[in-house]
Image (cartoon, rainbow, N blue to C red):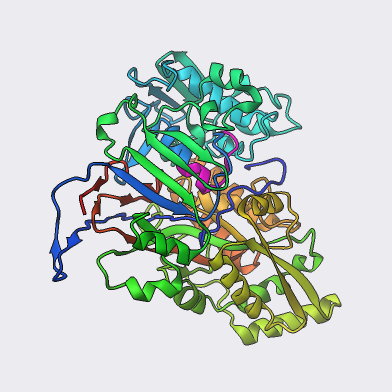
Amino acid sequence: MEGKFYKPLAVLLVFLIGLFVVGCSDSGSKNENSSNDEKGSKQKNEELADEQVLHFVRTADLPTVDLSMATDTTSGEVLQRTHPGLITFKNKEIVPEMAAEMPKKNKDGTVYTFKIREDVKWSNGDPLTAQDFVFAWQRLIDPKTKSQYAYIMGIANVKNANKIMNEESDIYGQVDKLGVKAIDDQTLQVTLESPIPYFTSLMAFNKFAPLNADYVKKQGENYAKEPENLLTIGPYKLTNWDHGVGWTLEKNPDYYAADEVNITKATFKVVKEKNTQLSLYKSDEIQVDSLSSEQVNAYKDKPDFQQVPGNCIFWWQLNAENVPEFKYAKVRKAMSMVIDRESLVNVLLNNGSIPAQYVVPKDFAKGPEGKDFREGTGDYLPGGVEEAKKLWEEAKKEHGFDKLDVEYVTTDGDSAAEMGEYMANQLEQLDGLNITIKKLPWNAYLDYVQNHKQELDAGSGWCPDYKDPMTFLGYWHSQGPNDAVGMKTDDYDKLIDQARQYAKEQKPKKRWEALKKAEKVLIENAYTIPTYQSGESMIIKPYVEGIVFQSFGIETYFREAKVYKH
């Protein structure tokens, strides 16, 4: 979301708890809901409701719908429905979207050719062309755009991408040198520096979607500020955006596969309080809700309930520029070891999340021998409170400090506040460590962290952009977004560079070994402090059928869902 940047920037900062419904599951799960009669037995109503409309809540406002500028999942959720790219994940399968077919590639895997659909039009009537992709990719990587996601072009290994982003390069800023061109209106050609194993799946990520050049240029600074300043080619249009209150998506009748879109309207209301969300669910004002830990036990045996495993990883970002003591490995290790992650997920979260002392999720990616990345690896820093206290005291003695005051920044949702109190209590088991919690609204939080004002950021996280460990591990490379702010990570960089070289040399086994070693170095040095792998406990109205939760792309795939009379 993936070296990445040549300037230190924070990117995707997602805070799952109390922010949004995330359904990430490698296997996926489809809810087959049904209505209940008075005796409590399941009885499916076969008659569709007159209006095929769904209502959702989100606890964060929509930050932006500018494709080049969005860094968060709330924005991404909208853009995936209004600006689909060449490839998409549909019902858990990777399929062509704006491409008419899967791409053709040359013998050595460095040139991909996409045929663009001829039956696609923008919502102003303009035909979609290959040049729309060229413009969007060049706009993203242009230093003038200042996109925090420009580095994704380097991760995709598109020819000259890293040089264009490098201020010391002789082609810095020359976006016309990027390895993407329109052969004709319906043919897009992408040239890579060298083959990479995940290129096709990466094309499903929204940053590789197209933009209508004439429209964007005409709108100027107003582009994407309001629904009337935005075009769409996807299954939905953004028709209303009441900033701070909510937004509405409505079916795009000109979408090339409009006949597949059954849900004609979806509303998203900003509601931060979990009890208020549940009240809206009970009164049928929303049809899907994520449950807080306190609410799970009341619903876990009901037909509404569904637990969705996820593949997002959450961690703490320690800013050693603002807290110099974070440069010391024993300080960081003690802070990691003192956390009781089991109680965190089983009591505080209680939603199917699992403890994580790693950054590549379980059941996410398999290596060249068909084994999951996590197979054969345990916790890198198992530690415990007593060992943490020992390391902490050693660090204080070695580096000459008696106490450490740290600001713990998080968001202002109910669950975020609860987690903040829990984590503060965990950390303050270390003698002399004093935690002050700073709660900020979502947009203010993003700004605070992205500008490195934080000392300890509680809400950093990553949901994968493509199905490969590098989508996570590339994050901490010194030329990537790199949440190890102010720390020397040369040992880690070396292993990531090795893995990238092995990819170019097409040595998958050696690449896999280097990636595993890199994760071990990352966690054992506590360059980052992971906390948990996501899960979500949800309730879905029995009269709603066919919502699919996906690992990639549109996480909550609802366009083919059905709403029955109730």
- The quadrant holding residue 559 is top left
Residue 155, compared with residue 446, is above or below; it is above
Residue 523, compared with residue 394, is above or below; it is above
Residue 308 position in % (x across, y down): 36, 61
Please state which of residues 513 and 284 is positioned toward the viewer in this rendering.
284
Does 305 lie within the magenta span? Answer: no
Please state which of residues 164 and 546 is positioned toward the viewer in this rendering.
546
Residue 131 in view (yes/no): yes
The residue furthest bottom is 386
Q: Is residue 329 left or right of residue 380?
A: right
Quarter holding the N terminus is: top right
The residue furthest top is 184
Residue 200 in view (yes/no): no
Residue 232 position in % (x across, y down): 44, 28
Total marks shown come to 0
Q: Residue at x 82, y 81 (%)?
A: 397
Q: Residue at x 34, y 17 (%)?
A: 118
Q: Is residue 526 left or right of residue 131?
A: right
The residue furthest front is 283
Q: Which residues are magenta?
A: 68-77
Residue 46, compared with residue 354, is above or below; it is above
Q: Is residue 166 left or right of residue 242?
A: right
Residue 347 position in % (x across, y down): 47, 78
Q: Residue at x 30, y 40 (%)?
A: 263
Please state which of residues 123 and 517 is positioned toward the viewer in this rendering.
123
Residue 488 position in % (x across, y down): 74, 57
The residue furthest right is 400
Quarter holding the C terminus is: bottom left
- The quadrant holding residue 34 is bottom left
